[in-house]
Amino acid sequence: MKRLTVMIAAVLMLFSAQLYSQLDDTKQIHKFMGKLNLTDEQKKDVEKIHFDAEKQTIAQKAKVETARIELQQLLKADAPDKASIEKKINDLADLKVQMHMIKINSWFAINKLLTPDQQKTWKKVLEYGPELQRHKMMRQMRNRHMPSPHPDAPMPK
């Protein structure tokens, strides 16, 4: 039972770390967007796609967090049901896949708006995806090992 609980906790930590690292993705994508030399019409359309994707992502994050809390409840039950816990973990994984699909769908929607030359630059967003993930993971690992400041310590300038 302890082993299952530890394994589930590890899975949940990975899920939450990925959710909070999405802001870094957005910054990197904006760098690529600047290199595209979009027309005003393209900018307007891309902005709409981004807003729609952001709304979908927020709704999806809420589902993930709700499922995470439900999993915690299952784990804390007096008599935890292994089948229910496994199902909830699978539900969490499915929700995470759906969140990734929001990103992919918005990438393809933007790609449709672009000229062939712009598409070559835009494709680099996908090509650099694994590299961006490695950089994020390294940043997260460094941030986890930094000691938390004492509540009475002065704020850095």
Image: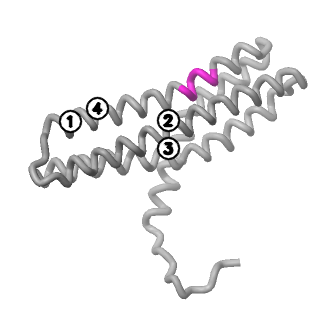
* Whole-number angstrom distance, CA of label 2 to CA of label 4: 15 Å
Q: Position of residue 108 (x, y in %)?
A: 63, 18
Circle count: 4
Give the amino acid at mark 3: Arg
Identify the amino acid type marked 2: Gln
Which residue in the protein does label 1 denote?
86
- Residue visible at 51% across and 25% down? 101
Secondary element type, mark 1:
helix
Mainly helix, strand or loop, the magenta region?
helix
* Disc 2 to disc 1: CB gap under 8 Å: no
Please report whichever mark, 3 or 1, sits nearer to the chain's N-terminal start.
1
Q: Is residue 102 above or below residue 60?
A: above
The residue drawn where x is 46% and y is 27% is 98
First in residue order: circle 2 vs circle 1: 2
Q: Amino acid at mark 1?
A: Glu
Q: Is residue 93 left or right of residue 61?
A: left
Q: Which segment did they paint magenta?
A: 102-107
Display coloring: one colour
Q: Residue at x 86, y 27 (%)?
A: 37
Q: Are marks 3 and 4 in contact (CB under 8 Å)?
A: no
Q: Quadrant of residue 102?
A: top right
- Mark drawn on residue 90: 4
Q: Which amino acid is tagged 4? A: Asn
Q: CA distance from mark 3 to mark 4?
A: 25 Å
Residue 8 position within the rendered picture, expressed as x and y whole percent measured from the top left: 25, 47
Q: Kindly identify which residue carries mark 2.
A: 60
Q: Check disc 3 and report the residue beneath it.
A: 134
